[in-house]
Every structure is written in C-alpha cells, then in structure tokens.
Image (spheres, rainbow, N blue to C red):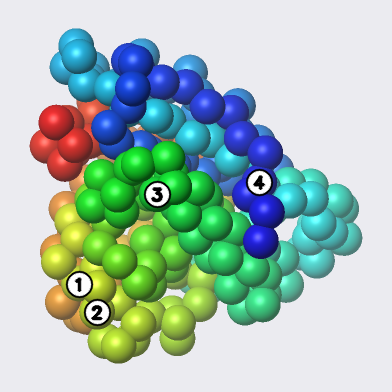
Amino acid sequence: MSTLPCVTLETGPNPTAAVIWLHGLGADGNDFAPVVPELGLPEGLAIRFIFPHAPTMPITCNNGYVMRAWYDIVHFDQISRQADRAGVEASVGHIRALIAEQNAQGIACERIVLAGFSQGGAIAYTAGLTHPEALAGIVALSTYLPTPELLTPQSIAANLATPVLAAHGSHDPVVALTLGEQARAAVTQLGVDVEWHTYPIQHSVCLPEIQRIGAFLTARLA
C-alpha cells in the first residue's frame, strides 16, 4: 500500500523519533502542524512530525458530501456513531504503511507516537492499539471508538502496556464527552493504562491541553 501525502516537520536534524498526527473529518494534514511550536518540547529533541492527508470520500451522514475522511459515517447521534468498518480497516492499513515507512528510515516502532483528533483520534486508538509491534504512545483527542469490536485482548496484545493520553472538551457539541468516556472505559477494561483529561472547551484543543501533550511526548521520546 502506498503511503498517503503528508505535511512533515522536523524539530531537529536526524530525527530519532516520530509522531504521526491524524486530522479530523473534513480537515487535512495542515490542521495541526501549527501546534508543534506550542508543545514546549525540550531543545535538542529531534522528532519528525508527520501529518497525513486522509483520502477523500462521500460521507453518508453529510448527504454524501465528499471530503477528507478516515472512514464513512453512516449515522451518528450524541451517544453513538455508526462507522464504516471497512473504511476504518483501510485507514488502519494506511497508518501501518506510514509506520513502516518510518521503520525503513531507521525509526523503530518503540520511538513512534500515534496521535489524532476526532475522527483521526478514532483511528489513532484503533491503529495504535492493534499495531503488531509496541508503539511509544497513543494520543486520542476529542474522540471515540468507531469499531470497538476490532479491539480484543488478542488484537491489542502488543500494545497492552503502551501509554495512552486521552483528552476531551467538556462542552463538546460534536463528539459528546460521553463518547470519550465510553472509549476510555472500554480500553481501560481491556487493561490499557489511559491518562484522561477534560478541558472546559468545545470541539477543539486549548493551550493547557497542547502543553500536556508536549509533556507526554517528552516523557515518551526524550
């Protein structure tokens, strides 16, 4: 599988670690690139940040409007999402290809963090926990589990001990806080350690949240 087009930023020469950061529905890889300088990473920590552009596809719940998306959403409400499982699995394949590309450039899985916001966070949860090798960490922002049935004790065995940072806006009108709490409960029940934070915001990120992500990345990759 060929890798997706990406926006790539490096915080120093010869990066020894990578962060693959997935955007939300209808956005693109440029969405979170401006966040990198706000993370407060230590000087000299050379990380390659990769912000892929999701494929374009019609989204059923948006009257078939074509936009960048990691999978189709057939139906949604405040407490559930009906996601296209085949689309989720296809995006997991895209992320595995991106990880393999970094492996080929000398960055091992244990030096790679997978992050994502909203629909991108849903793929970060799924692709990260089911990756066949242990990753350095997973960051899941304002998100949910699109296909919980893909997460089983067998499928997440390699990443059972991988730290997860999950955060959510307490006033989120797009992905209700309940969905984030359900995701945290589900992966915690499987034995995954989840660091959970809420912030008094809507469907977005805020500076304290970005700084918390920076601290997580520093702890995992420095």
In front: label 4 or label 3: 3
Badge 4 marks a residue whose secondary structure is loop
Q: Residues within 10 Å of mark 3 (few under 14, many from 20)?
A: some
Q: Position of residue 69 (x, y in %)?
A: 69, 53
Which residue, given by chain and number where applicable, does mark 4 sit on? Answer: 4
Badge 2 or badge 3: first in the primary sequence: 3
Is 41 situated above or below 201? above
Q: Residues within 10 Å of mark 4 (few under 14, many from 20)?
A: some
Q: Position of residue 42 (x, y in %)?
A: 17, 17
Residue that appears at 18% across and 56% down: 163
Residue that appears at 59% across and 73% down: 89
Badge 4 or badge 1: first in the primary sequence: 4
Of 43 and 204, nearer the camera is 43
Identify the amino acid type marked 4. Answer: Leu
Badge 3 marks a residue whose secondary structure is helix
> Is 61 left, or right, of 47 in this rendering?
right
Badge 1 marks a residue whose secondary structure is loop
Which residue, given by chain and number where applicable, does mark 1 sit on? Answer: 160
Is 137 situated above or below 38? below
Identify the amino acid type marked 2. Answer: Ala
- Label 4 – label 3 distance at C-alpha: 16 Å
In front: label 1 or label 3: 3
- Label 2 – label 3 distance at C-alpha: 20 Å
Label 4–label 1 contact, CB within 8 A = no
Which residue, given by chain and number where applicable, does mark 2 sit on? Answer: 157
Is 171 situated above or below 88? above
Which residue, given by chain and number where applicable, does mark 3 sit on? Answer: 103
Identify the amino acid type marked 3. Answer: Asn
Badge 2 marks a residue whose secondary structure is helix
